[in-house]
Image (spheres, rainbow, N blue to C red):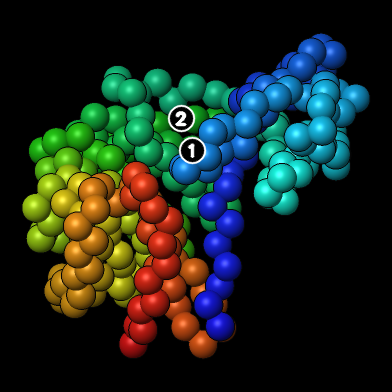
C-alpha cells in the first residue's frame, strides 16, 4: 500500500512558552509549497480565529492543529538552554539518543559537547570546506558528517579519529541518513543525487539522480514490508522505495 503524505507543516514562534508565561501571544503558521502560508497567533487561553485550534497538553507541551489540512503538531518548550559558542554560524546539530553528547557544525570543524552543560569536549577537524550536516550513529560513539567539500566522514567521538572518508558527490553534501545500526548510510547533495554507501568497504552501491535541484533532507522510514528513503528538495517531498540487504 502506498503511504499518504501530508505535505503541510506547522511552525510556532520559538519562544512561545516565555510569551505564554507572561500572558502574551505567540505567532503560528501553516505552510505548503504550492499554497499561500496561513498566519495567526495563539493566546494562552487558546486560538484567536477559526484557522487553528490548540491544546496545552502540559505546562511545556502545546498541540496545535490547522483545521483546513487537519495537520497536527506538538511543540515542546525547552527545559534549559546554554551556549556552545561556535566561532561560525552553526548550520547543523545532532544529539545522541540519551542526549549525553551533542555535535554542532562550526565552519570546517565539528564541536562535540556535553548535552547537559554545553561544555565542548572535542573539536573534529578534517573537512576542507564548511560542514553542512552532522548525525550520530545509533551507538552514540560514532559521528557521520558531510560538507561543502563533497566529502562524507565517519568519526570516533571517543578519540577524534576519522577512519573513513566517502567521496563521490559532485557538489556539497547537504544531508545524511543512517540505515539500521549503521552498516550502510545514505547521503544527499546539491548535485541532485542520493547515494547509498557501505561503511565497511567505503563502496557506493546505489545512486539515484533526481535532476531537480538540491536534496535538502533525508529520513529513513521503516514501513511494513519495505524500507523507504524520504527526501526533500526545494519543490518536492517524495518517497523512494529501496530494498536494503
Q: Residue at x 29, y 30 (%)?
A: 106
Density class for disc 1 (Cα within 10 Å; few <14, some 14-19, many ≥20) is some
Which mark, by number, is residue 97? none
Q: Is residue 5 left or right of residue 43?
A: left
The image shows residue 46 at horizontal and vertical percentages of 87, 28
Which residue was labeled with disc 2? Answer: 119
Instruction: Locate the N terminus and report the quarter of the image it occupies.
Output: bottom right
The image shows residue 137 at horizontal and vertical percentages of 40, 61
Q: Is residue 240 above or below residue 143?
A: below
Q: Is residue 153 above or below residue 181?
A: above
Q: Quadrant of residue 68?
A: top right
* SS class, disc 1: strand
Instruction: Locate the C terminus and report the quarter of the image it occupies.
Output: bottom left
Most foreground residue, 156 or 19:
19
Q: Quadrant of residue 243?
A: bottom left
Q: Residue at x 49, y 69 (%)?
A: 221
Which mark, by number, is residue 114? 1
The image shows residue 226 at horizontal and vertical percentages of 47, 83
Q: Is residue 104 left or right of residue 16?
A: left
Density class for disc 2 (Cα within 10 Å; few <14, some 14-19, many ≥20) is some
Most foreground residue, 209 or 119:
209
Q: Quadrant of residue 104?
A: top left
Q: Is residue 203 left or right of residue 43?
A: left
The answer to whether marks 2 and 1 mark residues whose Cβ atoms lie closer than 8 Å is yes
Amino acid at each position: 500500500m502506498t503511504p499518504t503524505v501530508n505535505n503541510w507543516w506547522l511552525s510556532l514562534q520559538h519562544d512561545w512558552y516565555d510569551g505564554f508565561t507572561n500572558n502574551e501571544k505567540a505567532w503560528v503558521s501553516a505552510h505548503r509549497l504550492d499554497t499561500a502560508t496561513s498566519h495567526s497567533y495563539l493566546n494562552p487561553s487558546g486560538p484567536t480565529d477559526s484557522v487553528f485550534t490548540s491544546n496545552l497538553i502540559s505546562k511545556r507541551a502545546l498541540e496545535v492543529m490547522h483545521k483546513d489540512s487537519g495537520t497536527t503538531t506538538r511543540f515542546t518548550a525547552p527545559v534549559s538552554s546554554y551556549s556552545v559558542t561556535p566561532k561560525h554560524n552553526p548550520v547543523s546539530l545532532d544529539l545522541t539518543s540519551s542526549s549525553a553528547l551533542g555535535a554542532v557544525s562550526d565552519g570546517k570543524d565539528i564541536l562535540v559537547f556535553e548535552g547537559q552543560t554545553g561544555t565542548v569536549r572535542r573539536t573534529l577537524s578534517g573537512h576542507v570546506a564548511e560542514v553542512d550536516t552532522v548525525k550520530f550513529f545509533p551507538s552514540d560513539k560514532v559521528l557521520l558528517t558531510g560538507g561543502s567539500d563533497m566529502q562524507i566522514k565517519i568519526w570516533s567521538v571517543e578519540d577524534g579519529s576519522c577512519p573513513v572518508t566517502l567521496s563521490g558527490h559532485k557538489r556539497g553534501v547537504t544531508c545524511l541518513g543512517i540505515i539500521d545500526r549503521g552498516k550502510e548510510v545514505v547521503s544527499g547533495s546539491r548535485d541532485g543525487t542520493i547515494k547509498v554507501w557501505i561503511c565497511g568497504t567505503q563502496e557506493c552501491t546505489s545512486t539515484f539522480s533526481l535532476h531537480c535541484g538540491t536534496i535538502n533532507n533525508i529520513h529513513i522510514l521503516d514501513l511494513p514490508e519495505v524500507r523507504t528513503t524520504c527526501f526533500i528538495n526545494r519543490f518536492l517531498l517524495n518517497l523512494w522505495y529501496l530494498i536494503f540487504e
